[in-house]
Amino acid sequence: MRVYWSVCNTNKIGISPLRYQEPTSSTKDMYDRITDIESNSNQIKRCPAIRNYHENVFSLKFPIDYYLSFRDDTQVSTNMYDQEFFNNFFFIRSLKDRLFSLKLHYIFVTEESCVADFFPAINADNDFVNSTNLLSGRWDIGKWYRSLDCAFFLKEGVKEITIKEGMPYCYVRFNTDEPIEFIRFDYTNNIKDLMEHHLTIKKHINIRKYYPISWYYKFIDKVNYNAKIIKEINNNLI
């Protein structure tokens, strides 16, 4: 299955899209931790149950180094880059709830229906994964076109997070038996406009009412929006 991928809003945030890596197999994060090849731990590499769970599961990695300091429930600061970058890259959802977002906007699109799961990098051992509870999500990337949000709860007692370029932070599972072929595209203004048009469906609704994701899909299906998106993507492959 072809999975088109890119990153969006990079101009506003200030991180070059060239810094973002193509997703890699999640099993590598686990295998990299197995160094005692003479012990029973090496058998993990051949375990069919583990391999089956991680089939078509891929790792997303940080594109840059960064540092965050948290002072109780009152302040978040950094000693890296400038205030403008902090304001654009880091989103404080609630200091009281210790809920934040890093604006790492990977986006995935398929020609046909494909449900994707986004969840913590459970095999990785790093400061971000160990200090946070990443919020998971699921949607059909052939019907709903939105970027990922790296939203997380900061664990109790954590005072700082050190992020390193290439450090895994999230896994993506593509729920298909087909092998995955990643194809990168340039996130142009035309693609941005098409994707933002459908996201405005979320406006002017009753905020006190829950709308299942299938409610949003039906608007896309009505106008065959997928064909428009794919046509524009194919005109801007990298």
Image (cartoon, rainbow, N blue to C red):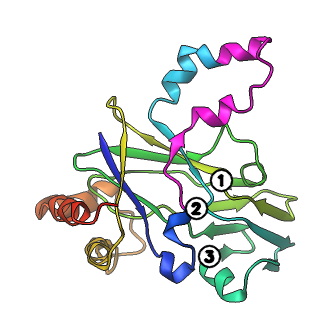
Q: Are marks 2 and 3 in contact (CB under 8 Å)?
A: no
The N terminus - image quarter = top left
Q: Along the polypeptide, which appears first: circle 2 or circle 1?
A: 2
Q: Along the polypeptide, which appears first: circle 2 or circle 3?
A: 3
* Residue 89, disc: 3
Q: Quadrant of residue 95?
A: bottom right
Is residue 35 within the magenta segment?
Answer: yes
Q: Residues within 10 Å of mark 2 (few under 14, many from 20)?
A: many
Q: Quadrant of residue 203?
A: bottom left
Q: Residues within 10 Å of mark 3 (few under 14, many from 20)?
A: some
Label 3 residue SS: helix
Q: CA distance from mark 3 to mark 1?
A: 17 Å
Q: Quadrant of residue 211?
A: bottom left
Q: Which residue is mark 1?
A: 166
Q: Residues within 10 Å of mark 1 (few under 14, many from 20)?
A: some
Please, what is the three-letter code of the amino acid marked with disc 3?
A: Phe
Which range is magenta?
20-44
Label 2 residue SS: strand
Q: Nearer the viewer, mark 2 or mark 3?
A: 3
